[in-house]
Amino acid sequence: MTRALNRMRVLVVAPSRYPLRQPHAGGLEATVWDRVRWLRDRGHEVTLCAAEGSDFLEDSAYALPAPEWSRVEDASDTGYPEGYAAATDAAHAALLERLRDERHRFDVIDNHSLHPAPIRWSRDAGIPVVTTLHTPPLEPLLEAAAYARGSAHRFVAVSQATARAWSVEGVDAFVFPNGIDTDRWTRGPGGSRWVWSGRIVPEKAPHLAIEAARVVDAEIVVAGRIGDVDYFQQEVAPRLGDRARYVGALHQPDLCRLVGASAVALVTPMWEEPFGLVIAEALTTGTPVAAFDIGGVSEVLAGMPGTAAVMPGDVTALAHAARDLAAQGQREPLTRVWTRRAAVREHALSRRYRDVERVLAHTAQPAAERRVPAVSW
């Protein structure tokens, strides 16, 4: 990897609900984990602010509290244990005071948090901030964006669909889709079974993928972290059996092998999916993708061979599309080569992050006079 010409000092702020480590809690965490790694490989000085227990978290002062659930079945991707919100508010307030004292330590903040405080830091701490919008509009973030208006702050969005949703609410953003490390997501041999991977929550709807496989009597494997125990027990577990297996949350190499050894990957969002990292992951292994067309899904699929999009919730159409893609792969083995080649060309991490690097550097320009001269590599 070629090193950056101008070394930046970057504070990367991660979402605090789950630590950044494998197996990744979701696509957001995987994206930020890759971001830290890539920026460091490019020669930038990166400090991570993330939940306790995260990889790359080297300064305890920038550790955020992670939720502690008294019962496993209470764990949720949408709620928090009692007292957690107050604890995170206090942690962010303490960080603001530290940043005010150490504002010369950073050139720019690369913010991926779903907490509104880091957006405000561009004004309150006087440090330029780039915030990536990974979700549909959230009211606390909209309020923070209004507060930060006029400060050294930029928004970027992971898809045109996400950018449009925020634009309606008065927040304009450049579009920089997520990228995949194509050295780690390698082409697989394919196989006969289907696969679904991701967070096991209602809005991702893996139970509909199982139903689609059942329509055409296909075998399917489901992989991912259970983010809603009640949903898993009520909608997913009863559908498991000889033709549908759940294998848990997998580390990236194991997940790559599973997806790459599958005939087709199903992607079944039932919400305004901001991006759909699992689509790019599957395509990079050469595995075709059948997906519900909602949110940013069509943008990730655009121009890709070995893909099909159907109306959200249409299980029968999804089943037939997946069956056809799997059959095509059996008839034309080179399809996997073409699919991976197109996915690498479109979704490679290096292509995406060089653009992000330029945005970070441009946003950091107001800080240029208060930092040491740039280092050449």
Image: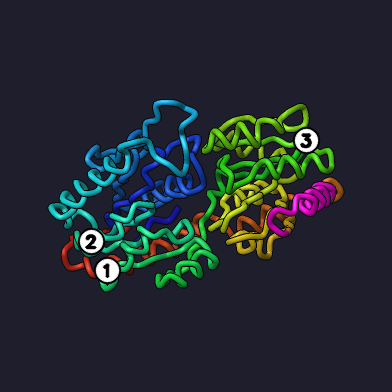
Residue tagged 1: 152
Q: Amino acid at mark 2?
A: Ile
Residue at 70% across, 54% down: 339
Residue at 48% across, 59% down: 136
Of labels 1 and 2, earlier in sequence is: 2
Of labels 2 and 3, earlier in sequence is: 2
Residue tagged 2: 127
Q: Is residue 236 above or below residue 204?
A: above
Nearest to the observer: residue 142 or residue 281: 142
| Occupied quadrant, residue 224 | top right
Name the magenta segment's main secondary structure.
Answer: helix
Q: Secondary structure at mark 1?
A: loop
Q: Is residue 224 magenta?
A: no
Alpha-carbon span between mark 1 and mark 2: 7 Å
In this view, the residue farthest toward the left is: 101
Is there any visible trace of residue 334 in the rendered image? no
Q: Is residue 349 above or below residue 85?
A: below
Of labels 3 and 1, earlier in sequence is: 1
Q: Secondary structure at mark 2?
A: loop
Q: Amino acid at mark 3?
A: Glu
Q: Amino acid at mark 1?
A: Ala
| Occupied quadrant, residue 55 | top left
Disc 1 and disc 2 in contact, CB within 8 angstroms: yes
Tell me residue 278's x, y (percent): 60, 48
Alpha-carbon span between mark 2 and mark 3: 52 Å
Tell me residue 298's x, y (percent): 64, 62
Residue range highlighted in magenta: 311-327
Residue tagged 3: 219
Nearest to the observer: residue 2 or residue 299: 299
